[in-house]
Image (cartoon, rainbow, N blue to C red):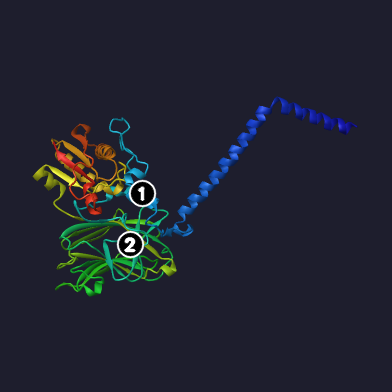
Amino acid sequence: MKRVKTITACLVFFSMICSNDAISQRKILRQIKEKTKAKANQKVDETTTKGVDKGFSEIDSLFKKKEVKENDPQHIDKENESPVQTETSTVVDSNSSDSTTEGIGFGLYTKFTFEPGNKIIFYDDFAKDKLGDFPLNWETNGSGEVVTNSLFEGNWFSVSGRNGYFPLTGELPENYTLEFDIVTNGLAKNNSATSLVLNFLNKKSYASGAAGGHGHFSIGMSSSHTMSVGNTGAEKTQRMQTNLNRRFIPDEKVHFSIAVNKKRLRVWMNEDKVIDNPTLLVGNMGRFLLFETYGINPEKEHVVLLSNIKLAEAAEDMRSTLLESGRFSTTGIYFNTGKADIKPESFAIIKSVAIYLKENPDVNMQIIGHTDAQGEESFNMQLSESRALAVKQALINQFQIEESRISTLGKGESEPTDDNSTEKGRANNRRVEFVKN
């Protein structure tokens, strides 16, 4: 009987709690649910982060071709859409007090000395090529195709086997620059002789061996191979061959920047200079370029992708141009598509402008932004203004140039210097101009 009374008392007590604190209990239950959900989301985030950190090998279906139906209305819309309109754009408001770029992260690129040429000869990001097809602006003695991947946006040119890939540039000038990105997968533990070789030829050829004398820069893409540089068949010149104490970075996006100045060859991998040879390219070496692949085997899950390939003629330097004409235009200040965020590889050009201003304290400068004709005209005008302002703020914040010496202007798509219907033309129209006041 005593036990029954005790149980009854407990039930009454619990009933009182339920009656008096029903709202509190609901709050507690809700908090428990919220904490449980947050914990689960945190676990998912941690798992995702670890998956990305492990690299491409942990992600299923990373590199993929997409079958596209030409009559698909959605496909047609996407083909005609401007990248400026389709992404969430970050445009700096020139009237806002927060329109600064104090957070620009040039990072290790503060040691980067590469300055790209001013007039673009060839540009290809494969944006207009159909996925699964060979790109229109290239030739080959083998095969290749345009693909996408789940980590890096845009279209990419997948190369493989032992093939030669020839960009349709025509004969190149004595002085030019080349830039391109490489994305790889499945090469971190690769021991086979896998490489991508950039050949500097004196005539058009799909194989370096058939071109006669040529210079070459070999990017060894395996755990047991390094990079090397050399030439062969040189005209009355001793052959050069040097293995570099530098290794390629597999399973990441790597940016290469190359400068050809007559006989001189310089190469940067990301922000680091890896080659500076003043006499490598003798004769007419370098008038044509050939990308040549060795041992890239899809059956072993080797993936090598190229994109953002830009060749530009290197004209007179900025100081000479400003002295002679009072204005200097460059396509070498890079921004994210549809945004005013300056990319870190733009450091060298902006630094050159800063040095010029410091050496000439009586000179004031106007910075003018220009865009291509993709997207709405009003948006492009605002974007060009924001980009000019971003360059100004970089000069002020990174190099301590007085704000009163710099003015900005945006001209949008109103003053094209090239054909907006081509990739090369649009790349030339996306530029920043510096004018002495």
| Residue in front for this viewpoint, 237 or 156 | 156
Q: Is residue 174 left or right of residue 194?
A: left
Q: Amino acid at mark 1?
A: Asp
Mark 1, secondary structure of its residue: helix
Residue extending furthest top? 20
Residue extending furthest front? 71
**The C terminus - image quarter:** top left
Q: x%, y% of residue 225?
A: 36, 68
For marks 1 and 2, the one nearer the N-term is 1
Residue at image coords 34%, 43%:
85
The residue beneath circle 2 is 246
Mark 2, secondary structure of its residue: loop
Q: Amino acid at mark 2?
A: Arg
Residue extending furthest left? 324
**The N terminus - image quarter:** top right
Q: Nearer the viewer, mark 1 or mark 2?
A: 1
Relative height, residue 243 to residue 72 (above, below): below
Are there few (<14), some (14-19), or many (20+) residues within 10 Å of tag 2? some
| Residue in front for this viewpoint, 197 or 370 | 370
Q: Is residue 421 left or right of residue 35?
A: left
Q: x%, y% of residue 151?
A: 41, 53
